Amino acid sequence: MDTTFNQLPDESGALLAPGRVALSVAEAAIAVGLSQRTLWTHIRAGNIRAARVGSRVLILKSDLEAWLSGLADTSGTRVRGDLAEPLAARNRARAELKKEAANV
């Protein structure tokens, strides 16, 4: 099944907003598999562009796709390389403490 936003089923199994270029926050949440609260948090933080049209808030499908694409790390490197060595050292120290406790 093609997984473009035009062909994603909603919770009832019906196609989600076929032919539309924008989604409501509720539709966008279903499309990306996140809660509406999470999307609202990202909208308020400015991470996801949204437009108020009357009383509705709409998200362009292209903006939603761009936001998701920006989250993906395809570099093959560690996401938090700055934490790798301190965490490894902490884990080694914990392992040694466990060994010492087991020997006592």
Image (spheres, rainbow, N blue to C red):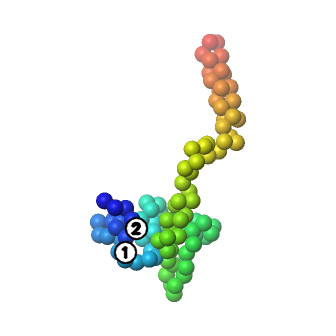
What is the quadrant of the C terminus in the image?
top right
Return the residue at label 2: 5
Q: Nearer the viewer, residue 76 or 101?
A: 76
Alpha-carbon distance for marks 2 and 1? Answer: 8 Å
> Who's the residue at 46% across and 76% down the image?
22
For residue 60, side relative to residue 18 (left or right): right
Q: What amino acid type is highlighted by mark number 2?
A: Phe
> Who's the residue at 50% across and 74% down the image?
59
Where residue 5 appears, as percent x and y from the top left, is 40, 67
* Discs 2, 1 touching: Cβ within 8 Å: yes
Regarding residue 101, the answer to whether it shows in the image is: no
Where residue 64 appears, as percent x and y from the top left, is 50, 67
Q: Judge whether 62 appears above or below 82 on screen.
A: below
Q: Earlier in the sequence, mark 2 or mark 1?
A: 2
Q: What amino acid type is highlighted by mark number 1?
A: Ala
For residue 45, side relative to residue 5 (left or right): right
Return the residue at label 1: 17
User: Is disc 1 surrounded by few (<14), some (14 to 19) or many (20+) residues within 10 Å?
Assistant: some
